[in-house]
Each structure stands twice: as C-alpha cells, then as structure tokens.
Image (tube, grey):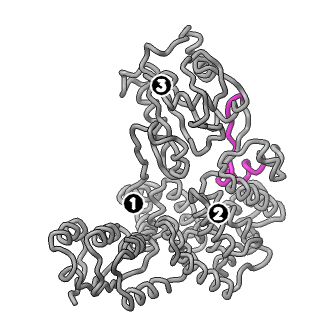
Amino acid sequence: MTKGVAGIGKTVLTQKFTLDWAEGKANQNIHFTFPFTFRELNVLKEEKFSLVELVHHFFPETKEAGICSFEDFQVVFIFDGLDECRLPLDFHKTRILNDPRKSTSVGDLLTNLIRGNLLPSARLWITTRPAAANQIPAECVDMVTEVRGFNDPQKEEYFRKRFRDEEQASRIISHIKRSRSLHIMCHIPVFCWITATVLEDLLKSREGEELPKSLTEMYIHFLVVQAKVKKVKYDGGAETDPHWSPESRKMMESLGKLAFEQLQKGNLIFYESDLTECGIDIRAASVYSGVFTQIFREERGLYQDKVFCFIHLSVQEFLAALHVHLTFISSRAVKKALQSPNGHLDLFLRFLLGLSLQTNQSLLQGLLTQTGSSSQTNQETVQFIKKKISEDLSAEKSINLFHCLNELNDGSLVEEIQQFLRSRQLSGKSHLRSCAVLSSVLSSPSSRLRDLDLSYNDLQDSGVELLSVGLKSPHCKLEALRSAFIQLFVPDSVWRKCWTSINKKQWMIIMD
C-alpha cells in the first residue's frame, strides 16, 4: 500500500512503474501488469464479473490472445485511489471466493483478491490518501510506503525551473520560506503550481502589493486569478474589468454547494447523480469545466461516461468553506470538524476560519455580497478553539486547531502555554499526556514558541523521550530552553541519548 495526500504524486508513481515495465527498463520478471483506477471500477458497481472477465473487460488484448488463466504467470494488479472507492469492500461478511472464473459483484471480487483468496500468487499495489487506508485490514498489507512529495531543495528547484527570471524566482522562494505554512504546503507538487500561478500574477499585475502569507489568502488569490482568466478569455472582457459577473457568481455558488455536499460524504469524484443532487445538470457541469478549467475538470471514464472532479482536493475544501461562509456559525463548524473520524474536514475548517477575517473578505469583493463575521465573533471562535485544545484531543486534531488559530492571525495561545508552564509543574501520571501535548505544539508549523521554561518539572524518562520528538521536529522554532530537570530528575544517559539526536540547532540552554 502506498499512502500520500492529494496531489502528492501517487498516480504518477504507478504510471512510471507501468511505463518502465512496458518499455523493458525494470521488473522484467513480471509477465502482466494490470493498472486499474477505483473511479473506473465505481462505474461497474451494479454489475457482476469473474476475475478473468474483469481483466478481459479492461484489457481486451488478453482475451484476443486467448489467455483465460493467470495462475502460471507473475501478475501485478494496481488499484489506484482507494479513497475514491464507492464499492462496498466488506472484509468481514463477504463470502470466500477461490475460483477466478466465477462471477460475483466487483466489490466482492476485489475483497477476495485483496484477502488472497483469489489468485494468491498475484501481487497487489493499492494507492490511497491516508484517511482511507484503514479500509484495508492490516493483516492484508505486507508493506506500507508513503509518497512525501518535494523535499526543501526540490521545492526550490521547482520554482527556479518555473520562473526563468532568476531575480523573480529568488523573490518568490524567499517569500515562501518566510511563510512557514506556505513552505510546508509546497511539499505537494500541485500546491507549488497553485502558488506559482498566484505569485506570477501578483508580481506581474500588482507590483508592490503585499504577497499572500496564509493558506486562505493564497486560495482566494487563486480563485480571483481564475475568474480574471475566464473574464478575458471567454467573456471578451479586459483585465481591468470587474472579475465577477452575475454568471460567474452563479457558477461559483453551484460549485461551492457541490464541493461542500460531496466533501461531507467523502466524495472526490462526481458522477451525474451527484451533480443532479446539487441541482447541476450534466451540460452545465461541462460548461463549468470548460471555463473554469483550472478549478473544475471533466474526465471520461469507462464507456465514455463523464466524471467530474476539482483540480485538487484542497480546491474542493476551499470552495466548500466559501459556500458555508455566510451560513454556518464558526464554532459549529469547529465542532463538526472535530467529530470527523478521519480528519477530512480539517483543511475545510482552516479555510472557513480564514475567510472570516475582514482582510480576506475584501480580496473577494464582487463575489461576496455581504461581509461575514465581526471581530467579536472571531474572538469568540478563538476562545472556543482554545477551549477545545485544552480537552483530550488527538495530536493531529490539536495541531490542526493550532493551524486554525494561525489562519485567524491569533498567537495568544503560545503566550498562555508559556504562562501555564511557568505557573504549574508537570508531575505524576499527568506528565505522558502533558509532554505529548507540548511535543505536538513544538512540532506544529504554526507554533511561535521560542522560549520554553520547564524548571523543576518531574518529566521522568518517558517524558523526556516524548518531548524530544517535538524538539527534533524541523518545525520547532525554540531558541531558549530553561530547565533543571536534566540534573534533578532524569538519568544522565537518558537525556544524553535524546539530546544527541536533537542537538542540531544552536539553542541557549539555561540551567536553573
């Protein structure tokens, strides 16, 4: 199984594997490679196939060659995009099927293939976004890999290749490095493209304007750029004309509704029935994909059926947030996101809260017909988020709430954490949990914690080890660490072991 966030390059990786094999460059011990996508398999949800029939259906060359059995061949099946699967994969109730010539539903067929009941000699490669990985039982997975996207040098290389003007490229790279949240997101190749699209437009047309620093700002500008392209390219307007015509506004409202309703269901690919539910007919959807080509796209699946999707999951999340901007109370949205079991509303929440800032709303003049939250409402939301962070949440949810505070331009929580650490001591059983939370704060890209005072706290061995995870994080911005626990409570060997692995920065260590 290969995991990775949307747009990170999982599909490209499987295509490269297949191409290298087909051209005789690698894996020549394999006789057949059969690449499938779940979005194609979804179309066959109501039909029945045997394994042999399914292969013949997608790869008719095998039928023409008279191959009706694969037991004597080395076969690789690739199933790309488990997160897009709408087939029922029931690993507990599905009846066992051993015969590759016996027909059954496609969901049962895949379940038996993954279980190893069907064609046990075959090798399977499944790609998925992390949130959907738990659909496959752990005992069915021999190896898990992760696509992590661009490392820091590759991010820089991307922008230098994208912008031939060396001065322009250097300016963009230094801006991205200054904004921690943007720099982190740039490990996703698609986000690099969005960022490049926005910054190129801003540097060309609005010289001297401040460049976007937050995720929400970046996506607002991206939407504005696409509206401007539509106005000039398809409506025959000038670049100085207002970007948002009544027609464009209606399109965005429809796409926002589609984005939100399908995000709630966990759907990233949309079929005609999904569009109809949101009041969009297939013809209108084709028009939207034709004029907003960098936001919404049409693809052709099996049998030339039309399927639609947003250019990237984060674009769907942003438009979903835009849709509910004036209809949801922010604290209600926080609750809804925290109730999500797989975190699929996390980025949506960051965008929604970012949109509540007046400065961001002003960038969408012409699209938003009225202003959103007041500063008082924003303050209430900040307080609500702080309250939630203090509760017993997972590290992932806590970190996302820190991101949310960053989108709201609020850094007061860091000061409160520092005061808490100065006024209270961590001891006893509460120290596994307190150190874990503190470690997640240190690891958070939005953390502004520079000075940490842990004087006279009994962290014990396990506490030090938990804390060292946060200190090792590349996102840790700590400059000063005040502590006596090194001497008083922790055996020298334990601290030395942890310290050796994290001492890559020049920190001021103050011994009380």
Residue at the spot of label 2: 318
Q: Residue at x 43, y 48 (%)?
A: 147
Q: Position of residue 336 (x, y in %)?
A: 66, 66
Foreground of the two, 401 or 63: 401
Tell which circle, 3 or 2, labels the residue nearer the N-terminal end: 3
Query: Type of residue at label 2?
Result: Phe
Q: Residue at x 56, y 8 (%)?
A: 66
Q: Residue at x 67, y 49 (%)?
A: 267
Instruction: Identify the mark at residue 420; answer none if there is no mark.
Output: none
Instruction: Identify the mark at residue 33; answer none if there is no mark.
Output: 3
Query: Type of residue at label 1?
Result: Glu
Q: Residue at x 73, y 30 (%)?
A: 46
Quick one: label 2, few (<14), some, or many (20+) residues within 10 Å?
A: many
The secondary element bearing badge 3 is classed as: strand
Relative side of 286 to 421, left or right = right
**Is residue 255 a member of the stretch shown in magenta?**
no
Residue range of the region highlighted in magenta in the rendering: 287-303
Looking at the rendered image, the disc whose residue lies closer to the viewer, 1 or 3, is 3
Tag 3–tag 2 contact (CB < 8 Å): no
